[in-house]
Amino acid sequence: MKKILIANRGEIAVRVARTCREMGIRTVAIYSDADRAALHVRSCDEAVGVGPPASRESYLVIDNVIAAARQTQADAIHPGYGFLSENAKFARACKGAGITFIGPPPEAMEEMGEKTRARRKATEAGVPIVPGLKEPIPEGGEAAAKAYAKEIGYPIMLKAAAGGGGKGMRLVENPKDFDSSLATAKREASSAFGDDRVYIEKAVSRPHHIEIQVFADTFGDAIWLGERECSVQRRHQKVIEETPSAIVTPELRAEMGRVAVNAAKAVGYVGAGTCEFLVDGNTRNFYFLEMNTRLQVEHPVTEWCTGLDLVRWQIEIAQGARLPWKQEDVVKSLRGHAIEARLYAEDPSKNFLPSPGTILELRLAEGPGVRNDCGFESGSEVPRYYDPMIGKLACWGATRAQAISRLRRALGETVVKGITTNVAYLKRVLDLDEFRAGDYDTGLLAQAADRLKTSPPEEDRDLALAAAAIWQLEQDERTALSAAPAAASTESLWARAGRLAALRRSR
């Protein structure tokens, strides 16, 4: 491969571009009108616009992405995660255009990428699954679906059939909320994946969300690369991930890994994939949930503890290489502990309302064992059209306690000005006694909601200080301000403070 088009945006596009650069492979970025000046565009050698801001008119339009690859004569397409990464139609379109899709075959994506088919496949292989529908709810099948939900007993989960990442997922506690939850889940699924089909699954009590990273090559070999604990979730969206899990024993890890590898081999899987399981917090029994047929957001923690570059593996396997490791190599390589926090442009004090806007200043933490995967920089615009994740902060330590302390220190050194973020909230999560103990489940954040409440965000306090500084500067620069009062009144506090300070220094 000499040139790879990255069919994504934000931090994952930047991250893929870095590995390509190390491998001497040129890169092509795609962008919507809202992302014209985005960091991922400047991180690649070439860039092509694919449409208006809305993802359904740009990043999710297969013809536009394929046209961009043809225009730039790209050999391959890396889909990242989200958008078209689990779309078998897109994988087939790549093949039809003579472009290598860096991911599994479309047939494997159809078997495992669609969650209900994956459940059927797991059942055939004798893998325990959570009770639930083996087919999506059909059009006009709402009454039968409600009857089935009543039969297996509430609470139940409504989950998108065509994707993951917490999109199109709703916990339904009682029958009266079924219709509204179904409508919301279908709407979210359609927006995120272009497919509004939803299925039902029984909700498990005290569940741990544990996933196994697998890799397979075109020669029929497959291995697992350890587990990730992903139980710190808000609205079924992962917030903090770590490896290894504090509750997974070597025996349980090996058994879950064996099941995950068998599932991958059963469908002729190729490349990076993740099998997700629910582990009962009391019995430690595990149940297959689904397989994500792509690279995961949280792959950095696996890279920390194995020393691997999973994107490089994806590219090399797509070029026809064999897996460079055997399973015993993995077991020997696992070392230390890694933990990752997702940085979002959102306001925890306002029910996590997204906080799009311009990042006036961004300073990322550094130091031993600290990794930043970020899709933005100072001056970047966080658009309102997409997921508000700014990036990920992942830290490694020799022990779990050291990794947590390192992450907390790194969060304390992370500075984001101009928009509100969840940085202070993440630090509070790390301080929870339940989290520190390690044996927490997916209900942690909801149960600790009162203890995690934030005061007005740090950004508001900084703006208050800026306002006070402006008042003092205005006293000194009364004459200068009087010449253009209208302009001053429309500026942001940050912009006015900076302009006035510069004016004062020049005098």
Image: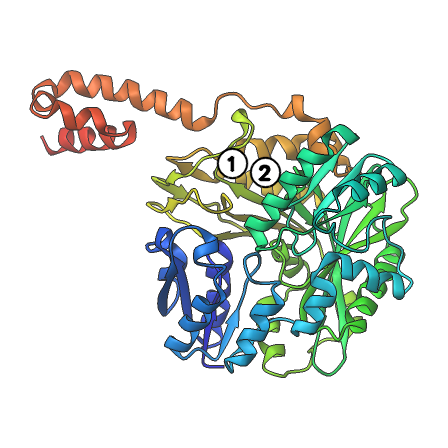
Q: Secondary structure at mark 1?
A: helix
Q: Is residue 494 left or right of residue 108?
A: left
Q: Quadrant of residue 240?
A: top right
Seen from the viewer's position, the closer of residues 339 and 320 is: 320
Structural crowding at the residue carrying mark 2, measured as other residues with C-alpha within 10 Å and reported as few (<14), some (14–19) or many (≥20): many
Task: Say whether residue 369 is visible.
Answer: no
| Residue located 54% across and 58% down the image | 83
Q: Give residue 60's position: percent from left, percent from top.
A: 50, 59
The residue identified by callout 2 is 408
- Residue at 83% of width from left, 50% of height from top? 248
Task: Give the percent coordinates (x, y) of residue 262.
Answer: 83, 69
Distance from Cα at disc 2 to Cα at disc 1: 6 Å
Give residue 464's quadrant in the image: top left
Query: Mark 1 — residue?
Result: 412
Give residue 357's position: percent from left, percent from top: 38, 39
Whether 285 is drawn above or below 434: the answer is below
Q: Is residue 349 left or right of residue 327?
A: left
Contact? badges 2 and 1 (CB < 8 Å): yes
